[in-house]
């Protein structure tokens, strides 16, 4: 479903700030995989998501989604295939626009953007139904400016926007890291529900080892720009944080990998 083959990415090549961020990355996802991604700072987790999203191109390698070569496709042309939620709740939405206007833009993903044709009553009904599922009372605030929402409300809305049109691949880049623990749990529960309901193929980057173990059907660990651990099935279900720290000799990285 997703194939990453021989990916390399170096930033600031030929300078004193040269950094090899992705180093021969190989990864294959099957349809419906919910993969959690962990690794220390600088392991290449977010860079991998940025390469998939087309934020910048790889130096070499292949990115293929559903058999279609995305490697050199511009970022805006990948939007029809991808949904993405960022770490910062301020990203992914237009703060000065209303909730329904943001949802309308999401519904038009991959098409000509804009609201010149207006929002239909049928669309508003759809938005209310989807917002009601969040259980945050947003279905009664369709015209409220998104900038007035709390971080948790905004991140839940961004998650809804990213999945309003079922994406081929959902990318979650530490999307609960900026939230308080209670709100983070709610957003993670919403994430799990939406992914399961729509059978979404998902990559979720997290620093929280408990979340990485608890959610999804597969866990990968990255280090120095490539995958060093790939666990699924019963092995993942029975995994404990201490086991992960011991088994893969990452004691020195404990401060970078939250186990709270």
Image: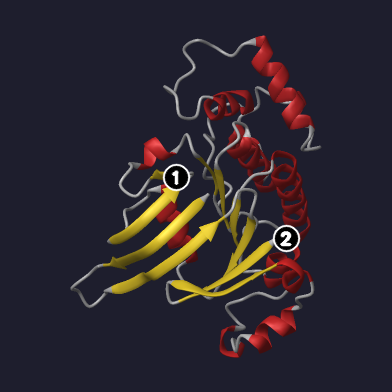
Q: Is residue 127 above or below residue 90?
A: above
| Left or right of 183 in this view: 76 | left
**Residue ranking furthest to the front:** 67
Front residue of this view, candidates 96 and 9: 9
- Name the residue rendered at 77%, 70% in the picture: 234
What residue is rendered at 72% in x and 26% in y?
Answer: 141
The answer to whether residue 42 of the structure is visible from this angle is: no
Question: Disc 1 marks which residue?
Answer: 67
Q: Does 12 appear above or below 121?
A: below
* SS at badge 1: loop
The residue lying toward the viewer, choosing from 257 and 77, is: 77
The quarter of the displayed image where residue 8 is located? bottom left
Residue 85 as seen in the image, left or right of residue 137: left
Q: Position of residue 96 (x, y in %)?
A: 53, 30
Which percent across, then down, holds residue 47?
43, 61
State the residue at coordinates (64%, 54%). Answer: 33
| Circle nearer the viewer, 2 or 1 | 1
Q: Which residue is mark 2?
A: 215
Q: Position of residue 221 (x, y in %)?
A: 57, 72
């Amino acid at each position: 479903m997703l194939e990453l083959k021989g990916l390399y990415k170096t930033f600031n090549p030929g300078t004193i700030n040269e950094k090899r961020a992705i180093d021969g990355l190989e990864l294959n996802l099957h349809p419906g995989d919910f993969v959690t991604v962990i690794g220390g700072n600088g392991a290449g987790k977010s860079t991998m998501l940025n390469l998939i999203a087309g934020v910048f191109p790889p130096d070499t390698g292949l990115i293929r989604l559903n058999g279609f070569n995305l490697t050199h496709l511009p970022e805006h042309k990948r939007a029809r295939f991808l949904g993405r939620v960022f770490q910062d709740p301020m990203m992914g939405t237009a703060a000065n626009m209303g909730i329904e206007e943001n949802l309308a833009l999401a519904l038009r993903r991959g098409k000509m953007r804009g609201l010149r044709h207006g929002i239909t009553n049928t669309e508003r009904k759809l938005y209310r139904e989807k917002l009601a599922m969040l259980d945050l009372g947003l279905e009664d605030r369709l015209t409220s400016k998104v900038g007035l929402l709390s971080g948790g409300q905004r991140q839940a809305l961004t998650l809804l926007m990213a999945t309003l049109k079922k994406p081929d691949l959902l990318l979650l880049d530490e999307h609960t890291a900026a939230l308080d623990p209670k709100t983070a749990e709610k957003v993670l529960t919403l994430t799990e529900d939406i992914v399961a309901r729509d059978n979404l193929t998902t990559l979720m980057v997290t620093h929280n080892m408990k979340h990485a173990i608890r959610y999804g059907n597969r866990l990968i660990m990255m280090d120095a720009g490539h995958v060093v651990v790939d666990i699924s099935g019963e092995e993942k279900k029975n995994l404990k944080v201490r086991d992960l720290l011991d088994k893969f000799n990452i004691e020195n990285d404990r401060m970078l990998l939250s186990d709270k």
